[in-house]
């Protein structure tokens, strides 16, 4: 298989793009670096496509490797044929390769292997020939194989053993299995039955039947989880005549042969005992893998949108971690995220020291000039929201609050990193700090938490951990590198996601910073232990040095392109002091007037790199998230009981799933916008219209206070 050619065809791109990308990957370049600084070679492929190409590249390489292994294993047995060699070459997936290897694989003890040990293979071969006539009856021939020492005590036992061999041979036929798998998938149904006499979230699957080929991923994952938790039993149901008719047509070659009844019996036995259970396991495993991949892709998209949420810059924030018995923890952080003060108040049950708590909150607001209060949305959050709303009504200061997802805050608080950051704080104080910082800079704070714990996926805990971790880590890397980080303020957890930097070198950067003071230039990063020339090449463009004498150190221009940037400025009568001011805005116009390609030829640079350089010169230190909608800030509280059908509200999308989206409308309980209520136009998936963090107008359809369910629609909203 020509892997690069296959990749080009599958992704619909030029083979030169694939060839260059694969070469860059094999040379040890990271995906963020390739996407940002090697656009001329890749044809400006984005990071998402590059990661998909990378995953597919690894799969195809593993497929080729397995083909070679199987070829050698069969060849070593002296059983390789041109037909098998061609079948291996044509195999497109690993399952097909394993089907081909199946007959040659060392079997554990089976009924057929026992029959072979008893010397019955010649009898099975004779029956398989399906002659018109035999020298004598098949039963008489079978009598010749009776051997009590070998355990063959009768004609019936001899024929049964021979049929066991035939059944296994049918089951091991790669072509049969491939076609039966296809028939089962196209005509089969998943059927579920209730196994527990109790209500649960899986009640809709207590008596369910659905076509395999039409079953959406979220149903597959729900059925698997319900079965795992023993609420249901699931199985694949198909009219066996569909499969048996196919098998009879393939295996029974002579309807007039005396062997027909034995061949026919073997076909039925092979399907019922060997093929059907095996194919069911394979199909269900494949369905789960495909559903998991779909869920992982959705999780990736949700996570990316959450991490890239607009930061609330320049605000002093009070983090509020709600609680009951142990009180509510407060943490005030300044505009840079530095903790200024902490406190504990008890406005909720059982103590309900509301007046005393209000005095504390007001004092902190006035002392530190708090602009915004970030309230965690977990336990006691509704009571806390009401309390804060009442406090804000009583003060003249213009302070607003926002509800912030607590997902993963407790994980961070109890982590080694949380302990290192705040050794003198207890876990709830750390949570309050984390909640405040999430509002200030979601990316910088959320990278400290295992992505699986952030709460924007579906069924993530059921998936293969290694695959999920790799996918989500890739998303975090792309986000961190897209934004870039200030090398003088970033935590080592944030630095560890920068292209070319691992956890060890990230800690070394922080240690160097602590021992030697702030970095004064990008070049100084080369003095950090474990950061050599290759690592520097990969990371330099994504690290910002805001205090550097060289303004280019605070841009996304890579040091390898500094010379080009300076020649560009000089060519049009500018210098580095003009970067970011009004003069630089005319640069793009001047380039267009002279001709972009002509400028590129003169500077010996590709067009994509020239465009990127101009963008960076216009806005040094820019944050790509600044153009996104800011978090919804509130001053008053609403209760679920205040909602009425037809009421129109503004909300924030918290999670996008296969069948809809959950929207925070400020009443503690997120409302569901079903996929059918998202748009007047037909959409296949909610992600076509919505993304995590989107601010949307919704209308209340219905409210179920008992079940705490809110149904929303986006149709007919202003």
Image (cartoon, helix red, strand yellow):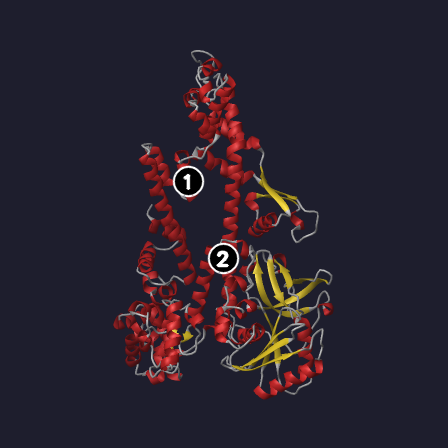
Quarter residue 607 falls in: bottom left
Picture quarter with the N terminus: top left
Q: Position of residue 426 (x, y in %)?
A: 56, 74
Q: Quadrant of the C terminus?
A: bottom right
Q: Give the quarter of the image for residue 235.
A: top right
Along the polypeptide, which appears first: circle 1 or circle 2?
1
- Residue plotted at (45% across, 67% down): 479
Which of the two residues, 426 or 179, is positioned nearer the viewer here? 426
Q: Residue, x 64% and y 61% (percent of image)?
A: 672
Query: Is any atom of residue 545 visible in this view?
Result: no
The residue carrying pointer 2 sits among few (fewer than 14), some (14 to 19) or many (20 or more) residues within 10 Å by Cα, namely: some
- Determine the secondary structure under disc 2: helix
Horizontal arrangement in the rendering, residue 718 relative to residue 305 (left or right)? right
Q: For the image shown, how many numbered marks are present on the structure? A: 2
Pick whichever, 558 or 500, lies toward us: 500
* Residue 427 can be seen, yes or no: yes
Circles 1, 2 touching at the beta carbon (< 8 Å): no
Decide which of 624, 666 is in the foreground and name it. Answer: 666
- Residue on which the image places disc 2: 297
Q: What label sits on residue 98 in the rendered view?
A: 1
Left or right? Give the position of 74 relative to 648: left
Q: Position of residue 110 (x, y in %)?
A: 47, 31
Crowding at dot 1, Cα within 10 Å, few <14 / some 14-19 / many 20+, comes out as some
């Amino acid at each position: 298989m020509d892997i690069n050619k296959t990749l080009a065809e599958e992704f619909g791109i030029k083979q030169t793009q694939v060839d260059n990308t694969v070469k860059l990957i094999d040379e040890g370049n990271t995906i963020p670096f390739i996407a940002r600084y090697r656009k001329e070679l890749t044809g400006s492929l984005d990071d998402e496509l590059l990661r998909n190409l990378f995953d597919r590249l690894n799969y195809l390489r593993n497929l080729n490797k397995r083909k070679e292994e199987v070829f050698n294993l069969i060849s070593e047995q002296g059983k390789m044929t041109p037909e098998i060699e061609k079948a291996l070459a044509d195999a497109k997936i690993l399952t097909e390769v394993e089907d081909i290897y199946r007959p040659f694989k060392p079997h554990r003890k089976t009924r057929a292997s026992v029959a072979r040990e008893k010397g019955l293979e010649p009898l099975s071969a004779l029956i398989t020939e399906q002659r018109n006539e035999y020298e004598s009856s098949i039963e008489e021939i079978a009598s010749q194989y009776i051997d009590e020492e070998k355990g063959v005590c009768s004609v019936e036992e001899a024929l049964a053993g021979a049929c066991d061999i035939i059944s296994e041979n049918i089951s091991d036929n790669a072509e049969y299995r491939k076609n039966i798998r296809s028939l089962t998938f196209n005509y089969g149904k998943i059927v579920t039955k209730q196994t527990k006499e109790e209500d649960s979230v899986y009640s809709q699957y207590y008596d369910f039947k659905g076509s395999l080929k039409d079953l959406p991923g979220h149903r597959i994952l729900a059925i698997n989880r319900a079965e795992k938790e023993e609420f249901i039993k699931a199985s694949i149901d198909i009219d066996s005549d569909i499969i048996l008719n196919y098998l009879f047509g393939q295996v029974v070659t002579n309807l007039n042969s005396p062997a027909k009844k034995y061949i026919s019996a073997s076909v039925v036995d092979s399907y019922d005992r060997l093929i059907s259970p095996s194919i069911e396991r394979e199909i269900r495993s494949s369905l789960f893998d495909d559903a998991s991949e779909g869920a992982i892709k959705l999780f990736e998209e949700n996570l990316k949108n959450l991490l890239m949420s607009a930061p609330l810059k320049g605000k002093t924030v009070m983090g509020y971690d709600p609680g009951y018995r142990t009180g509510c923890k407060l943490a005030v952080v300044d505009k840079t995220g530095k903790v200024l003060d902490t406190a504990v108040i008890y406005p909720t049950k059982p103590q309900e020291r509301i007046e005393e708590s209000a005095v504390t909150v007001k004092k902190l607001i006035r002392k530190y000039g708090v602009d915004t209060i970030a309230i965690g949305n977990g336990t006691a959050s509704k009571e806390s929201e009401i309390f804060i709303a009442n406090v804000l009504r009583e003060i003249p200061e213009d302070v607003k609050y926002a509800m912030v997802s607590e997902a993963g805050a407790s994980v961070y608080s109890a982590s080694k990193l949380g302990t290192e950051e705040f050794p003198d704080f207890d876990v709830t104080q750390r949570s309050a700090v984390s909640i405040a910082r999430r509002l200030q800079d979601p990316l910088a704070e959320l990278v400290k938490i295992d992505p699986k714990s952030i709460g924007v996926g579906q069924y993530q805990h059921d998936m293969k951990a290694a695959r999920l971790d790799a996918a989500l880590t890739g998303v975090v890397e792309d986000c961190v590198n897209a934004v870039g980080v200030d090398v003088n303020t970033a935590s080592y957890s944030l630095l560890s996601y920068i292209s070319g930097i691992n956890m060890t070198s990230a800690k070394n950067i922080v240690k160097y910073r602590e021992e030697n003071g702030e970095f004064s230039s990008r070049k100084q990063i080369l003095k950090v232990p474990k950061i050599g020339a290759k690592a520097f090449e990969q990371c330099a463009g994504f690290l910002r040095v805001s205090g550097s004498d060289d303004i280019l150190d605070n841009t996304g221009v890579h040091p390898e392109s500094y010379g080009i940037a300076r020649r560009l400025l000089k060519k049009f009568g500018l210098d580095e002091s003009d970067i970011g001011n009004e003069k630089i805005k005319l640069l793009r116009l001047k380039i267009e007037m002279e001709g972009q390609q002509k400028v590129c030829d003169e500077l010996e640079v590709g067009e994509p790199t020239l465009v990127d350089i101009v963008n960076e010169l216009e806005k040094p230190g820019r944050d790509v998230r600044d153009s996104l909608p800011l978090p919804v800030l509130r001053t008053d509280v609403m209760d679920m009981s205040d909602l009425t059908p037809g009421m129109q509200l503004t909300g924030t999308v918290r999670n996008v799933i296969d069948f809809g989206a959950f929207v925070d409308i400020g009443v503690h309980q997120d409302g569901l916008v079903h996929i059918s209520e998202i748009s007047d136009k037909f959409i296949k998936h909610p992600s076509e219209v919505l993304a995590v963090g989107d601010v949307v107008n919704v209308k209340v359809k219905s409210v179920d206070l008992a079940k705490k369910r809110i149904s929303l629609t986006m149709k007919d909203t202003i």
